[in-house]
Image (cartoon, grey):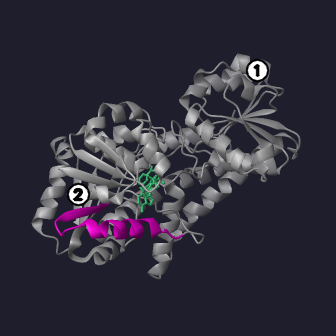
């Protein structure tokens, strides 16, 4: 079966490579020629562990193209284009509708067009209206996590499929055939209507963001009363009704999905004249969290960061990705620079460092250009720093040579924005003269 994929970003490329690995012939189309050229050379334009190897391994079943006509004869076409937020926080669906319009002339009425992009309620219906009788539209929201995206592709926790009420039975059967690998693995399937499938995605992301915002807000109280948020989260998380995931206090959530999806859900409530109380609070707490953390840092330096140099450990929005979208680390860098500080940044992922360097070069007239320097070496990052800020939760920070860091920095202060350093290590570091501050942690 020939399968088409529209958009070769984080979702589309994983979908294309994953399906090729499962044995399908895949044609992946993108309007971005530079991405297609890189993919044809066997080089993924994004970093994801194991992706390059899998791409090269399955090259004979993968065809990358800049010509939409090459999608002709695809029995199923997965739409994986971006749905960023517009200036008001609403989902911008231009890429989705433009993709649908481009493929419409190629469709014959027997194809299935699957929306993998995260889209607000009513979008699948609108795309079906746009395509008319030329194809059947199916909602299949994506839940992969960047950093472990390939693992998530092959081992999803669920597959959600939303169908239109008048879709013939063969459409369902064909979708189940494509996902037979997951059925055999007994992955749970949620088969539902378009609207429910669309909302499952927004509800899931907003709920996860809400858990983090809840624990972050609680961390502020914990700190005031002398409690330890990590212990509180552990005590909560052992209750299976709560679960222990997404209860790590820190500098807040970012990334390509949570911010825009929480905002888009807020909009959907408003459009239906409902008050989005929890999503709104979730967003507000997150917006406050970085400022709360910045103030913590400022207090340590007597309220003045002017002329101080900080080593910023972690640049992307989470570990093992080069994706900088809505990265709390970069937002914090900007805030520090605004306070007159100089920031030296490092990330273990080379692509993340490269992408920040590009940002710095592009924004020659902004704060970034003179306040942020990206180092390719951890020692260079730490040299002469007045403080070390951990902004991305790499466990590796625990295994680094903090004694050597102590010799490199000018002032031994750690601001652990992810509460990632283990308690024993923190105790040792404090005994060796380091000042340590986490989020809702007592030392
Ligand atoms: P992305 O920005 O990385 O990739 C989108 C790609 O689509 C780009 O390469 C772009 O050039 C291409 N494109 C745009 N319009 C096109 C068109 N008309 N024809 C062909 N190509 C076109 O985006 P992403 O992170 O892969 O996200 C895609 C969708 O999946 C979004 O709706 C997002 O919310 C959702 N999603 C993302 C993730 C994630 O972790 N990134 C996880 C789950 C769901």
Residue 18 appears at what percent x and percent y? 30, 41
Snapshot quadrant of residue 116: bottom left
Q: Are marks 1 and 2 in contact (CB under 8 Å)?
A: no
Task: Give the residue pinned by disc 1.
Answer: 406
State how far apart marks 1 and 2 are (Cα).
57 Å
* Highlighted range, magenta: 90-115
Q: Is residue 76 visible?
A: yes
Of residues 189 and 412, which is closer to you in this image? Answer: 189
N-terminal of the pair, mark 1 or mark 2, is 2
- Decide: is 441 above or below 424: below
Q: Residues within 10 Å of mark 2 (few under 14, many from 20)?
A: many
Left-right relation of 181 to 91: left
Question: Element type at marker 2?
Answer: strand
Is residue 176 found inside the magenta-colored segment of the image?
Answer: no
For the image, the number of numbered tags is 2
Residue, x 61% and y 42% (percent of image)? 355
Snapshot quadrant of residue 272: bottom left
- Decide: is 100 above or below 216: below
Task: Give the residue pinned by disc 2.
Answer: 76
Residue, x 38% and y 65% (percent of image)? 99
Residue, x 54% and y 58% (percent of image)? 259
- Decide: is 21 above or below 142: above
- Decide: is 113 above or below 156: below
Q: Quadrant of ligand 1?
A: bottom left
Quadrant for the C terminus, please.
Answer: top right
Residue 107 appears at what percent x and percent y? 23, 67
């Amino acid at each position: 079966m020939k399968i088409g994929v529209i958009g070769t970003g984080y979702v589309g490329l994983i979908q294309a490579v994953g399906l090729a690995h499962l044995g399908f012939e895949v044609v992946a189309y993108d309007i971005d020629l530079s991405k297609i050229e890189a993919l044809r050379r066997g080089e993924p334009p994004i970093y994801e562990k194991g992706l390059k190897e899998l791409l090269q391994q399955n090259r004979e079943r993968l065809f990358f193209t800049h010509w939409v006509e090459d999608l002709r004869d695809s029995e199923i076409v997965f739409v994986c284009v971006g749905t960023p937020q517009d200036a008001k926080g609403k989902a911008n669906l231009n890429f989705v509708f433009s993709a649908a319009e481009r493929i419409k002339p190629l469709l014959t009425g027997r194809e299935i067009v699957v929306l993998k992009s995260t889209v607000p309620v009513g979008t699948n219906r609108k795309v079906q209206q746009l395509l008319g009788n030329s194809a059947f539209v199916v909602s299949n929201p994506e839940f992969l996590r960047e950093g472990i995206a390939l693992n998530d592709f092959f081992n999803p926790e669920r597959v959600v499929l939303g169908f239109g009420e008048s879709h013939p039975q063969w459409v369902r059967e064909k979708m189940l055939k494509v996902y037979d690998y997951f059925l055999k693995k007994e992955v749970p399937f949620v088969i539902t209507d378009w609207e429910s499938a669309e909302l499952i995605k927004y509800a899931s992301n907003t709920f996860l963001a809400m858990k983090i915002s809840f624990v972050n807000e609680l961390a502020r109280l914990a700190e005031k009363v002398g409690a330890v948020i990590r212990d509180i989260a552990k005590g909560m998380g052992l209750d299976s009704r709560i679960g222990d995931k997404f209860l790590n206090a820190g500098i807040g959530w970012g990334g390509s999905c949570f911010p825009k999806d929480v905002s888009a859900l807020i909009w959907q409530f408003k459009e239906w004249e409902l008050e989005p109380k929890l999503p709104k609070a979730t967003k507000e707490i997150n917006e406050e969290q970085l400022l709360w953390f910045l103030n913590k840092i400022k207090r340590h330096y007597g309220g003045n960061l002017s002329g101080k140099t900080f080593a910023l450990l972690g640049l992307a929005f989470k570990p093992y990705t080069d994706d900088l979208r809505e990265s709390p680390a970069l937002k914090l860098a900007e805030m520090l620079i605004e306070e007159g500080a100089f920031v030296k940044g490092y990330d273990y992922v080379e692509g993340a460092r490269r992408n920040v360097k590009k940002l710095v070069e592009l924004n020659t007239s902004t704060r970034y250009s003179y306040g942020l320097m990206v180092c390719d070496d951890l020692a260079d990052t730490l040299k002469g720093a007045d403080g070390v800020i951990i902004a991305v939760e790499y466990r590796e920070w625990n295994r680094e040579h903090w004694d050597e860091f102590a010799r490199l920095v000018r002032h031994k202060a750690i601001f652990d924005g992810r509460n990632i350093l283990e308690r024993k290590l923190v105790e040792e570091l404090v005994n060796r003269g380091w000042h340590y501050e986490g989020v809702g942690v007592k030392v």
